Amino acid sequence: NFEKIEELVEFHINNGTDAIIVCGTTGEPSTQSVEEHMEAVGCAVAAAKKRIPIIAGCGSNNTRTAEETSTTSQKLGADGLLMVTPYYNKCTQKGLIEHYVRLAKGVALPIILYNVPSRTGVNMLPETAVKLGKMCENIVAVKEASGNISQIAQLAALLQEDPVMDIYSGNDDQIVPIMSLGGIGVISVL
């Protein structure tokens, strides 16, 4: 529904939203073809006309699919990428590093990692996120939705020592606790 995408982009511009995620995991990209996914990203980019950053959700459990959607989103004019951990595969921390490094090397856009183990079956450890931030300068943030405040506090402590990325809350009910640990905002479901 491209008319609704355009309407929602205008709504968010008019109401002070900082950025828009298109085809994030809360929506329907897991049931879209790559073509439909890219059409939605292209529609939002065209509607925004650079008035608000458009961040394309490009994570996948298939690294090649994530590469394809990432490079195409960059060509379409997206301003950044949101990359969920590869779901269902339950890869190791080493596997996460290999996956994300390959994706980061394929694009020039800033990348936000997305840790949501309750949905994906894999938890990105704080050390892994920080290592990725050090290895890839375009990995600039993590959307943290593990729900584990102790783990997020550990991530924040590591980033205080070496501030290679920002932390965003990925859970609306944890915005204040995460911001009190040094998070800079929320990527909100609401």
Image (tube, helix red, strand yellow):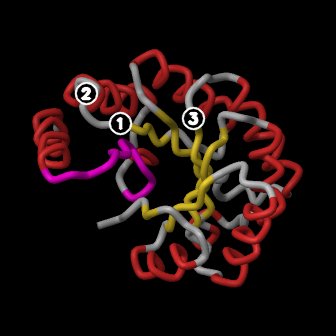
Q: Secondary structure at mark 3?
A: loop
Q: Which numbered marker is on residue 43? A: 2
Q: Name the residue located 42 percent from the left edge and 49 percent from the top edge.
A: 24
| Residue 120 image-quadrant placement | bottom right
Question: Residues in magenta?
Answer: 15-26
Numbered label attached to residue 5? none
Residue where numbered disc 3 is placed: 110
137 relative to 11, above or below:
above
- The residue most toward the top is 75
How far is disc 2 from disc 3 in space, using C-alphas? 20 Å
Identify the image quadrant of residue 46. Answer: top left
Q: Position of residue 45 (x, y in %)?
A: 30, 27
Using the numbered discs, state the Cα–Cα distance from disc 1 to disc 2 in whole angstroms: 13 Å
* Residue 17 is inside the magenta segment: yes
The residue indicated by pointer 1 is 53
Numbered disc in front, either 2 or 3: 3
Nearer the observer, disc 1 or disc 2?
1
Q: Is disc 1 placed on a helix, strand or loop?
A: loop
Please tell me which residue is depicted at 59% across the width and 69% down the height of the picture: 182
Q: Name the main secondary structure of what is drawn in magenta.
A: loop
> Gap between marks 3 and 1, in whole Å?
11 Å
The answer to whether 180 appears left or right of 18 in the picture is: right
Q: Position of residue 38 (x, y in %)?
A: 39, 27
Report whether 58 appears left or right of 161. Answer: left
Of label 1 and label 2, which has the lower sequence position?
2
Q: Report the quarter where the C terminus lies.
A: bottom left
Q: In terms of secondary structure, where does tag 2 sit?
A: helix
Where does the image place residue 23, in percent across and percent down from the top left? Answer: 39, 44
Q: Which residue is drawn at the image coordinates 62% and 61% (left, top)?
A: 115
Is 99 placed above or below 18 here? above
Look at the picture and state if 163 lies above or below 189.
Answer: above
